[in-house]
Image (cartoon, rainbow, N blue to C red):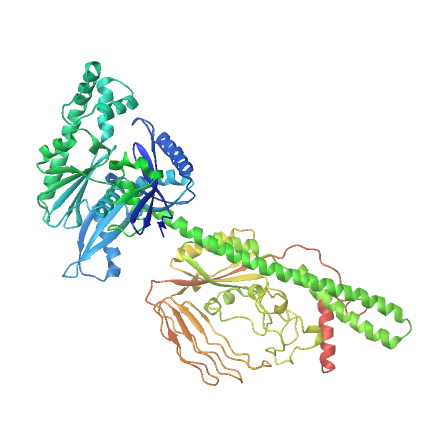
């Protein structure tokens, strides 16, 4: 079964753009697709116009090759990248990244936030030192290529370097050093010439020369005073590293001689630069004489280039066999003619099907951060969608119930009218009618007092800084005369001031159905008229949060409590100010003096000891960044004991004690030391949507005349007095 690449491989060169696809089969690699498009762009063309031409070329290649993939891998020129091998002291591997950043800052004259950086540990010495390859590039050098990719409707997955891509492919083809050899590879490209030296299977030296095929073409253009495109064709037809007109005669022979005369000074300058670069390597502590040279790139196909360079470098020179380790298909047959120019494209494609000796990714930090934000946005969008679906389902259920109750009211009205003078039956039906009217009023009250949480949630998510994470949010009730200092206290920030005795629970609410005693010690609420008013698990449960154990009808929640963690205090303050500027909120309550350093947030639970079925105390749970303690076990009910405290986070201490009632279990610890952080809590008050409220449905002077809430209270008092 062939393994197929899941990325678009693009070699964006100065003179052409190549697209290819490798497949890994049991018999080896197969070049399943190959497309090339020559740009034919004059070097004097403005950069903006060149980028537009490259975008159009990529779109044409994708269409021609019928590529549907969206993630891409490409390489930036080696001349733009800083590549160094460095020996680092024997430190913990977790510290290598910090040392690399420090070393890079000492050697590159740019701030660290203006470069894209990556490194790879090559090996560890006997003295436990790290030999590391460090690669860095100025972000501006990558952005131009990134714009071409994004404007081509592709996403950026990997940014390699042309020098390293060539090295990976020639290593795979076994074209580099044999034991005891030092091999230099010279890639004669259109814009530049790239040189690297391998010794004992490791990349030891690299240098990029600002001389290439385009400089030869430009010399011909100036000598013959012709357009660049014509000069390029003459270079292909008549160029030779040494004087050689072959079988040309007459005017053609004269043209060939003039072409070779024009390019001779450029070739001499190129040979001189190569001699100096190889000589510099020999002077290095780990340097030595180069034993042979391997050529690749378009310039390697020039007539007489091998003897020309062999004479000047004084070593064996040969042309690399680029396609010896890959099979072609009818869809990639054209690659045979372009073999010498394919080392970069094949090196990039190799990374999509198997591990390579050097795997560097210089994707700019901006793109990495954008991708993280996009993934976070998708996550929250799906979460909000789930809440919308749950909310819509519950609202639909409430509307159906409201319609059924209204139908019953109409039916009872008709029945009551038919009884005429039967006072006893009339009174009984009248009481049932009052009961139903109170329920209708109550449901109507809930319907007209709904608040919309969707837009506020959208701002809460979209305004969230990258250094902040939300770990909890819930709907709460904030009174108009609420003491904001008390609400924003450290205890409240840790979630320790939650209201008790509420059935249901706001946005994520829904207490268990059935009987439950309230905090005031009142009797259980199990009467027929209220049995369906407790929230059910898992819904948005605003109805279930309206009635306490003492029988009081509570106002619905009017605010969102947001708990989160941040590594930057300033980002939290900026976040709060953004929320305050949003019209979706009536008020934002936040006290910056109550940011809790490294304490995390604690959640504890108490067993429902007075529940009919017997309760089981749930263990406290602590999430901490530094120095936090595990939560205390919950207090067990009469049936089962409390469960263990539990610790989750970074650098916290174990849970202190187990449950108190009936055999708790000890706490547990998970996590590793982490960075300094702060927890924060914000209360966002949301205004009520303006909706017309329905007047009370009771008859004048009747129990429901004062509105649904008064009728509900009166009904509760009557039933309690009757012992129900």
Residue 607: image location, x then y, percent: 52, 79
Find the residue positioned furthest to the right: 421
Residue 93: image location, x then y, percent: 24, 60
- Residue 352 visible to an observer of this rendering: no
| Location of residue 104 with respect to 497 vertically, above or below | above
Find the residue positioned furthest to the top: 250
Q: Quadrant of residue 625?
A: bottom left
| Location of residue 216 with respect to 319 vertically, above or below | above
From the viewer's side, name the closer residue of 640 and 423. Answer: 640
Quadrant of the image containing the C terminus: bottom right
Looking at the image, residue 438 sits to the left or right of residue 235; the answer is right
| Location of residue 238 with respect to 160 vertically, above or below | above
From the viewer's side, name the closer residue of 610 and 206. Answer: 206
- Residue 518 visible to an observer of this rendering: yes
From the viewer's side, name the closer residue of 485 and 464. Answer: 464
Looking at the image, residue 403 sits to the left or right of residue 422; the answer is left
| Location of residue 312 with respect to 459 vertically, above or below | above
Residue 224: image location, x then y, percent: 23, 18
The residue that appears at 14% across and 28% down in the rendered structure is: 268
């Amino acid at each position: 079964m062939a393994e197929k690449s899941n990325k678009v491989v693009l070699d964006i060169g100065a003179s052409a753009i190549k697209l290819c696809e490798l497949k890994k089969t049991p018999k080896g690699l197969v070049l399943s697709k190959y497309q090339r498009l020559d740009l034919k762009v004059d070097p004097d063309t403005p950069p903006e116009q060149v980028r537009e031409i490259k975008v159009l070329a990529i779109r044409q290649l994708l269409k021609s090759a019928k590529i549907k993939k969206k993630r891409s891998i490409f390489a930036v020129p080696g001349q733009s990248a800083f590549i160094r091998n460095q020996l680092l002291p024997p430190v913990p591997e977790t510290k290598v990244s910090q040392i690399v950043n420090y070393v890079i800052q000492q050697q590159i004259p740019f701030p660290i936030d203006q470069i894209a950086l990556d490194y790879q540990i090559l090996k560890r010495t006997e003295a436990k030192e790290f030999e590391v390859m460090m690669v860095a590039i100025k972000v501006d050098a990558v952005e131009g290529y990134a714009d071409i990719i994004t404007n081509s409707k592709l996403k950026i997955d990997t940014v390699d370097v042309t020098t390293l891509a060539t090295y990976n492919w020639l290593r795979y083809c076994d074209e580099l050093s044999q034991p005891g050899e030092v091999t230099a590879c010279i890639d004669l490209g259109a814009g530049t010439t790239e040189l690297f030296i391998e010794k004992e299977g490791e990349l030891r030296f690299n240098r990029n020369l600002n001389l290439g095929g385009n400089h030869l073409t430009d010399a011909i253009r100036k000598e013959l005073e012709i357009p660049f495109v014509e000069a390029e064709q003459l270079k292909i037809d008549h160029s030779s590293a040494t004087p050689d007109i072959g079988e040309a005669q007459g005017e053609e022979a004269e043209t060939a001689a003039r072409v070779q005369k024009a390019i001779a000074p450029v070739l001499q300058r190129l040979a001189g630069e190569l001699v100096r670069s190889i000589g510099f390597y020999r002077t290095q502590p780990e340097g030595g004489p180069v034993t042979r040279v391997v050529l690749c790139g378009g310039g390697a196909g020039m007539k007489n280039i091998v003897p020309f360079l062999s004479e000047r470098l004084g070593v064996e020179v040969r042309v690399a066999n680029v396609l010896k380790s890959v099979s072609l298909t009818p869809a990639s047959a054209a690659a045979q003619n372009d073999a010498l120019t394919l080392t970069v494209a094949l090196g990039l494609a190799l990374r999509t099907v198997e591990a390579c000796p050097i795997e560097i990714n210089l994707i700019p930090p901006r793109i990495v951060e954008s991708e993280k934000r996009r993934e976070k946005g998708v996550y929250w969008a799906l979460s909000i969608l789930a809440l919308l679906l749950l909310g819509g389902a519950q609202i639909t259920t409430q509307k159906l119930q409201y319609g059924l109750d209204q139908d019953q009211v109409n039916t009872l009205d008709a029945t009551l009218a038919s009884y005429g003078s039967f006072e006893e039956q009339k009174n009984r039906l009248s009481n049932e009618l009052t009961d139903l009217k109170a329920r209708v009023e109550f449901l109507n009250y809930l319907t007209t007092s709904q608040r919309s949480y969707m837009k506020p949630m959208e701002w809460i998510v979209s305004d969230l800084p990258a250094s902040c994470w939300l770990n909890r949010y819930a709907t709460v009730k904030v009174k108009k005369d609420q003491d904001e200092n008390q609400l924003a206290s450290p205890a409240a920030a840790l979630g320790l001031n939650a209201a008790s005795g509420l059935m249901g629970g706001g946005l994520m609410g829904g207490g268990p159905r059935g009987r439950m005693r309230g905090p005031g010690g009142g009797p259980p609420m199990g009467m027929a008229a209220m049995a369906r008013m407790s929230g059910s698990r898992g819904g948005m449960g605003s109805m279930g949060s309206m009635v306490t154990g003492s029988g009081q009808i509570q106002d619905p929640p009017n605010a969102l409590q947001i708990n989160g963690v941040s590594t930057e205090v300033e980002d939290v303050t900026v976040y709060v100010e953004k929320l305050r500027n949003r019209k979706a909120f009536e008020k934002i309550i936040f006290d910056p003096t109550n940011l809790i350093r490294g304490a995390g947030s604690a959640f504890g639970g108490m067993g429902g000891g007075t529940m009919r079925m017997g309760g089981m105390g749930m263990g406290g749970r602590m999430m901490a960044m530094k120095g936090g303690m595990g939560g205390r076990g919950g207090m067990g009910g009469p049936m089962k004991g409390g469960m263990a405290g539990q610790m989750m986070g970074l650098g916290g201490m174990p849970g202190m004690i187990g449950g108190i009632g009936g055999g708790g279990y000890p706490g547990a610890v998970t996590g590793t030391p982490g960075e300094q952080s702060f927890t924060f809590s914000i209360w966002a008050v949301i205004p009520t949507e303006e909706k017309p409220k329905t007047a009370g449905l009771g008859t004048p002077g009747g129990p429901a005349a004062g509105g649904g809430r008064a009728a509900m209270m009166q009904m509760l008092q009557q039933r309690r007095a009757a012992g129900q």
